[in-house]
Amino acid sequence: MTHWLPDIDRRTGPRYRAIAEAIADDIQAGRLAVGTRLPTHRDLAWRLGVTVGTVTRAYKEVTARGLVDGEIGRGTFVRDPRTHGWGRSGEGEAAPVDMGLNFPTEMAESEAALRATLAQIVADPRDLRLADYDTNGGRREHRAVMADWISGFGVDASADTTLITAGAQHAISSALQALTEPGDVVLCDPLTHPGFIGVASTLRLRVVGVDWDAEGMAPEALDAAIRHHRPKALFLIPTVHNPTSKTVAAPRRRELARVIERHGLPVVEDDLYRAYADIDVPPPIAALAPDHVIYLTSASKHLSPGLRIGALHMPPRMRTRGRAAIRDSVWMAAPLGAEVVTRWLTDGTADRLRAGKRRAQTRRADMARQLLGSLLAIEAEASPHGWLRAPDSWEGSDVAAALLERGVVTTAGDVFATVPGAGRNRIRLALGRPRTHEDAVAGLELVAETLRHGPMEDRAFM
């Protein structure tokens, strides 16, 4: 282990991000050589005066960037940039089981479909103009297909109300830019998507978590928060919530819609995981309060993340600023990606790919329930993620750090928190990230084995 210590004193923003940026800078500058073992989570936390969770989150970020690898029983090491695969440093060598980020399964099917569709595009005699600048917000024929897709969920979408984005993260950013100014308040659940939290931080917005119960965000708490904070927007994930996997039932959606309409509050509804919801999933909140809800979806979680194609359905009064946000950030989503996705939506490829990924996710979710039992909440049959509660013996211990030492990358619960204490002693398991079902089972077995022992018995705390 090196005696290296990151310099974070002059860095702004969240501490975990400052640590991650310091690691990245020191690797690039050669101060951290390939193969260098980083300090343990607890050691670095003590030396910097931060929580173990902060260091865990920083190490997760640089792992996701491909800068470091965790090795089972050994620690975290600076990665050789020539390595391949998800954290593998050579053929036959052990690698962590990555269950940290939500990736879709069955990507070989998506790759094959992409090759076939690209061949069709090459052979198409029409002048498709896919190499040129495109209309801001996407060309009309692409928007029309995306609107038909959204309309199938019960939202009254059309080509005129739909804008194409460079993926879901860009859609979230564009929607918030269309609704807010720096310093504004945005409401959300006590636990929510870290991508939203990151965008809000970048836009210098103040995020306020609203109380919820077993049915979802509490309508009376939302009403009180609107009156007290005078927010400019509300961010919701009512279907296969990230990270808890819960889906808000139709009666609660109607209650929330009434509060939203009464106050005229703009809403950003993130509906990325609808493809993995149960068959009887209710219509989006955008269908209940159409004048107030920006609805977003994406091809990333159930078709192909590499195409970077998402969509925003926006009420008329918000559309001009939404289009401006897209223009000012990336100008346009790549027309080639939009062409591929719209062909998939119209020729049946999207349905076939979604069905394959759903079957794989269902199989993994069933195995997770079997191995982890009542500790794991997976509300949707095919949920791509589960919300894990640590046993009482782990109270106050960093579960994600212990699992990382054992060889499983997860996401600590506090990464999703917008109120103090939310997510404590919880972790999210991304079931789709391991490349094979066998890798997913191996990771789940390691999680189950680790949690069966008290934290003081685990090697990470010895």
Image (tube, rainbow, N blue to C red):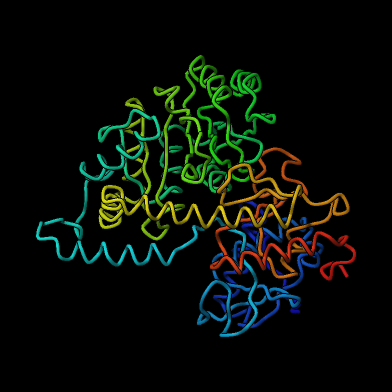
Q: Residue 136, how many percent across, how many down?
A: 26, 44
Give the farthest residue toward the top. Answer: 262
Would residue 6 be found to the left or right of residue 102 on screen? Answer: right
Res 440 quadrant in image = bottom right
| Most foreground residue, 173 or 29 | 173
The number of numbered badges drawn on the structure is 0
| Most foreground residue, 457 or 260 | 457
Rendered position, 297 above or below 335: above
Residue occupying the point 35% across, 47% down: 165
Q: Residue 167, how many percent across, how many down?
A: 40, 50
| Most foreground residue, 9 or 309 | 309
| Most foreground residue, 399 or 67 | 399
Residue occupying the point 34% across, 25% down: 317
Residue occupying the point 44% across, 47% down: 168
Res 58 quadrant in image = bottom right
Rendered position, 169 above or below 283: below
Would residue 55 be found to the left or right of residue 274 on screen? Answer: right
What quarter of the picture does the N terminus occupy?
bottom right
Give the farthest residue toward the bottom. Answer: 91
Q: Residue 261, how many percent across, how many down?
A: 48, 17
Rendered position, 267 above or below 13: above
Would residue 351 be found to the left or right of residue 419 on screen? Answer: left
What quarter of the picture does the C terminus occupy?
bottom right
Q: Residue 19, how many percent across, how many down?
A: 65, 62
Rendered position, 429 above or below 109: above
Would residue 22 be found to the left or right of residue 200 on screen? Answer: right
